[in-house]
Image (tube, coloured by chain):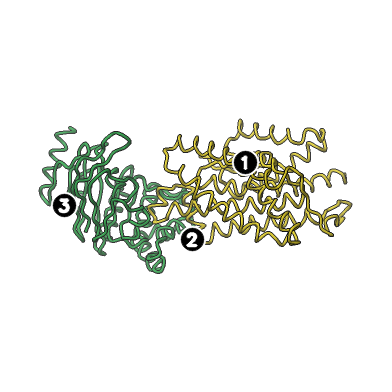
Amino acid sequence: MLKLENINAFYKEIQAIWNVSLNVQKGEIVTLVGPNGAGKTTLLRIISGLLKPASGKIDFLGHPLEKETPNKIVEYGISQVPESGKIFTEMSVLENLELGAFVSRARKEKDQSLERVYEIFPRLAERKSQMAGTLSGGERQMLAIGRAIMSGPQLLMLDEPSFGLAPISVERMFKAVEKINQQGVTILWVEQNVQACLELAHRAYLLENGQIVGEGKGKELLSFESVRQAYLG
Amino acid sequence: MQALGQNLVFGILVGALYGLVALGLSLIFGVTKFLNVAHGELVMFGGYACFWAFSLFGIDPFLSFPITMLLLFLVGAILYKVVFSHTVKFAEETKIKNTLLVAFGLSVILQNLALRFFTADERGITTSYFSTAFTVMGIRLPIIKLASLVIAVVFLIALQIFLKKTYMGKAIRATTQNWEAASLMGIDIHKVYLISFALGTALAGAAGALVSINYSIQPTMGLGWTMKALIVMVLGGLGNIPGTIIGGLILGVTESATSFFINSNYREVAGLVLFILVLVFRSSGFFGSKEG
């Protein structure tokens, strides 16, 4: 579904991503793990079009993404829950969700999408007229994820969604993501906290210093964990 | 007592005009974070559009609003496409410096274009009803000032409805809050910038029309109005649309009160003093958010 080939990217003169290739198959949950500063967020930004790669190819369902504008990429069917959610704090929960369905394809199905989001996150239905800025951390993350699926994406990317959340919120959030995947959405998940993803992910990539240093599935993820623990104690 | 009442009413009428002048600038700044210091010159052109529609074609100044606004909308769109869209590409600091520089250059160009084509003569509009006034409780309310107040309020309400209820309006508000998150929603940021700039310029045009109705216009009037707009924006909170009209009213009433209680020579100074006080004690403005 998504294929990155030899992506190189720079922030000004500093190279941040070195020859990265990865792929995500339809229906999978793929996780991208690595230490702080490895370039995971950068990679997601590149896929979403917020940062242009210096070289390399990105293919999504036959569409080349390397030179596309971010809004076109959303139209193609990729949606991202950015780091810390980035919800619109001066708008209500409902307005945030409605904005998620901004692309014309999603506008027609706005009501069904809303129902779907409320079904996965009942708390959002309760709070729909509340200002998003007044929500708790866990609720904001729910809103960010809900908003991202309002566009009816085929690929949902999450950037460290469990960051700063209480364990019980993390658990709820994981269950929600699992449900979303079961409904047919492919997931690309960036996490620093590997343990969190272990049970859920089908495959994983390990990113360090802007390079892919490992790839594995199932039990191999466990060996990643030991590698990580060796690195970080 | 009556003189005070007259004065206050006058302050409100002027204040509404100030608010409308600032509205366009506030919209543009909130969305694009450009401070278009040529805004006053756009107001000036709006004023001339209204004036020429009247003196060349005999169109009543209150009826030529749609023409003026459409014209200025197009001007704004072209200005964005040709000039400002290129400054967006830079990083934050360069962007801010470059846009200020570019906008300043633009204001000089626009002033000189006006001088060249319209001459430096002061222009004013007078129709048959211009000196008509109602008198309510001893307070004289000139009909053109009342109509101007109504128009300013109508535009504010219309803008609010646009921002709240339409998809483009919501896209504009989202971009104002967080442009990256907005582009992740599938919002075309360049389109939002373009429309905000064009709309803000159209509002400047409407304000200009009101200026030509209530005052006189000449090519160098721009700077004064840009200053007023900046003061109002700071009073109301940067990028805060409803706060802008209230900021305008505060400025208008403060100026009138100063003129009444102290001395009419200190009118302009009052606004500047208020400006400094707000910046020192409450830099987000009376109604701005903490990030302002």
Q: Which residue is mark 1?
A: B286
The residue under the point 74% across, 39% down is B254
Give the left or right position of residue B102, taking residue A178 as reference: right
The quarter of the rendered structure image containing the N terminus of chain B is top right
Q: Which residue is mark 3?
A: A203
Residue B191 as seen in the image, left or right of residue B218: left
User: Residue B249's spot in the image, x, y percent?
Assistant: 70, 46
Residue A204 locus on image (x, y percent): 17, 49
What colour is chain A? Answer: green
**How far from the left and from the top, in percent, is residue A173?**
30, 53
Which amino acid type corresponds to the residue marked 3 in the rendered image?
A: Arg
Under circle 3, the secondary element is: strand
Q: Amino acid at mark 2?
A: Tyr
Q: Reading the chain from its start, which is encountered first: label 2 or label 1?
A: 2
- Total marks placed: 3
B57 and B64: which is toward the camera: B57
Q: Is residue B258 left or right of residue B79?
A: right
Structural distance between the alpha carbons of marks 2 and 1: 29 Å
- The numbered mark 1 sits on a residue in which chain? B
- Write down the residue under mark 2: B167
* CA distance separating discs 3 and 2: 39 Å
Pointer 3 with pointer 2, Cβ within 8 A:
no
Q: Residue at x 76, y 52 (%)?
A: B213
Q: Which chain is yellow?
A: B
The verdict on a common chain for dots 3 and 2 is: no
**Residue type for callout 1:** Phe
For mark 2, does the 10 Å Cα neighbourhood hold few (<14), some (14 to 19), or many (20 or more) residues? some
